[in-house]
Amino acid sequence: MKWSLNELSSYQDAPLSVTEKLDLEKDLLDRYPKYILSVDPVTVSAHVFYDSGNVIVNAKVTGKMVVPSSRSLDPVNVDLDFNINEVYVKDEYNLKKYEELGDVAFLIENQKVDFDKSVADNIILQIPMHILSPQEEEGKEMPKGSFWKVISEQEYNNPKAEDKTVDPRLAKLKDYFK
């Protein structure tokens, strides 16, 4: 989804409405191979408004991606369904104006708006910080190794009674400060 300012200038009375399927998998896997395993083509429905050289894009993105589990690195499916609202400006003056208002704005380069890049960046933002596979959510055994194991937060906060047993040689000391 790339638009030139000349093309968008003809949409001053009504917005440009576009729905496209974007295949961003190669770009995302090249940029973020550790965080994304695969991405299906996403559907982007956008309304593009042209206002005196500035471009406002309101879009809805839907699709699916596969990311590694944060615990075991097993593949986990993630549904994508989010909105993007962005402003593209033609010069530095307008860029400062939007920054003063607290909005995020992007500078238009080469008289073109490249929205594919923005969709890819926003897909990255949709990856959850903590995601588990369905088996892990059901309580599958935690990963472990020779001298280590992963424990749940509940196990960490409530250690077993076995861990609270006192060495019999030190048992007499427990009454020392009474």
Image (tube, rainbow, N blue to C red):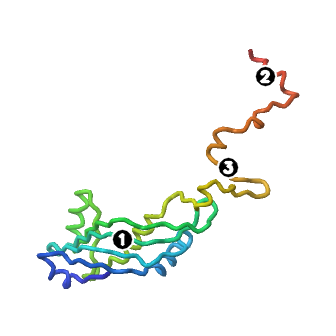
* Disc 2 residue type (three-letter): Lys
Q: Is residue 70 left or right of residue 90?
A: right
Q: What separation in Å lies between label 2 and label 3 (alpha carbons)?
A: 29 Å
- Rendered residue at 84%/21% (across/down): 172
Q: Going by the image, does 31 lie left or right of 116?
A: right
Tell me the SS state at disc 2: helix
Residue plotted at (26% across, 57% down): 102
Task: Give whichever of 171, 104 is nearer the camera.
Answer: 171
Residue located at (44% from left, 64% from top) = 126
Q: Is residue 160 left or right of residue 63?
A: right
Give the secondary structure at mark 1. Answer: strand
The amino acid pointed to by label 3 is Ile
Q: How far apart, in angstroms, are the residues tagged by discs 3 and 1? A: 37 Å
Foreground: disc 1 or disc 2:
1
From the top left corner, tell me how far across and down residue 86 is, in percent. 28, 67
The amino acid type found where label 1 is placed reads Val
Q: Residue furthest front?
A: 138
Q: Identify the residue at the far top of this view.
A: 178
CB atoms of marks 1 and 2 within 8 Å: no
**Residue on which the image places disc 3:** 151
Q: Earlier in the sequence, mark 1 or mark 2?
A: 1
Mark 2 or 3: in front is: 3
| Whole-number angstrom distance, CA of label 1 to CA of label 2 | 63 Å
Q: Is residue 150 left or right of residue 115?
A: right
Relative image position of residue 114 (x, y in whole percent): 32, 79
Q: Residues within 10 Å of mark 1 (few under 14, many from 20)?
A: many
Quadrant into which the N terminus falls: bottom left
Q: Which mark is residue 174?
A: 2
**Circle 1 sits on which residue?**
61
